[in-house]
């Protein structure tokens, strides 16, 4: 009887452990920042609201610098490239330390894009009356020097 109860307890414990492991959900992997990557594709694919500071640090490494953004939130700036082709991605963290937006800047037609804006356009959340992205306002000729 005693062995039967122990065996039943062990079976339940093992079953619950395997069930818990199967139910565990892992954070999605954010896209890597690189000079070669298409910035619009990176911003479109970045999972907003789920990546924590620790996960961002683990994936992207140490930021070039940390800043306080105008809205009061913390931002981590990642700089890529050289002076002539400098690209910056800024991760914006909310009070719960999750990435809520990614801001992108360069000296070119994609300057000023944000992940929220790109994802809203891709999901057709922004209607036809919404202001277009900065790179869509001006023809590419205006960015050539």
Image (spheres, rainbow, N blue to C red):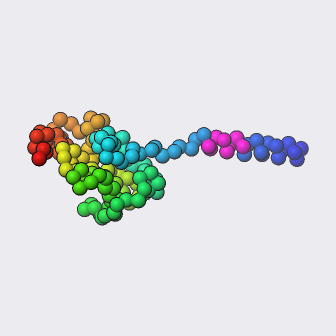
In percent of the image, x 33 and y 56: which residue is there? 78
Identify the residue shown where x is 76% and y is 41%.
11
Q: Main secondary structure of the magenta part?
A: helix
Residue 60 vertical position relative to residue 110 in the rendered view, above or below = below
Q: Nearer the viewer, residue 74 or 57?
A: 57
Report the residue at 53% width, 43% height from top: 25
Asked if residue 136 lies left or right of residue 29, the reply is left
Return the x and y of residue 130 as percentages of the image width and height. Answer: 18, 41
- Total residue callouts: 0
Provide residue 16's location: percent of width, then percent of height. Answer: 68, 43
Location of residue 123 by image quarter: top left
On screen, residue 84 versus residue 98, left or right, reads: left
Above/below status of 76 relative to 126: below
* 10 left or right, relative to 35: right
Q: Is residue 91 visible?
A: yes
The residue lying toward the viewer, choosing from 113 and 130, is: 113
| Magenta residues, start to end | 14-21
Q: Is residue 23 magenta?
A: no
Q: Is residue 90 visible?
A: no
- Which image quarter holds the N terminus? top right
| Quadrant assignment, res 137 | top left
Q: x, y percentage for residue 127?
A: 21, 36
Q: Position of residue 114 (x, y in %)?
A: 27, 47
Q: Residue at x 72, y 43 (%)?
A: 14
Query: Is 65 left or right of 107, judged from the image as shown?
Result: right
Q: Nearer the viewer, residue 110 or 107?
A: 107
Is 15 contained in the magenta span?
Answer: yes
């Amino acid at each position: 009887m005693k062995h039967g109860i122990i065996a039943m307890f062990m079976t339940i414990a093992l079953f619950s452990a395997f069930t818990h492991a199967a139910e565990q959900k892992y954070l999605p992997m954010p896209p890597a920042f690189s000079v070669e990557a298409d910035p619009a594709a990176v911003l479109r694919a970045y999972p907003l609201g789920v990546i924590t500071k620790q996960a961002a640090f683990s994936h992207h490494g140490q930021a070039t610098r940390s800043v306080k953004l105008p809205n009061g939130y913390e931002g981590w700036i990642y700089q890529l490239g050289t002076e002539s082709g400098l690209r910056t991605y800024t991760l914006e963290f909310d009070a719960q330390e999750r990435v809520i937006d990614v801001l992108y800047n360069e000296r070119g037609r994609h300057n000023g894009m944000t992940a929220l804006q790109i994802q809203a356009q891709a999901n057709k959340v922004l209607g036809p009356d919404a202001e277009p992205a900065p790179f869509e306002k001006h023809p590419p000729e205006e960015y050539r020097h």
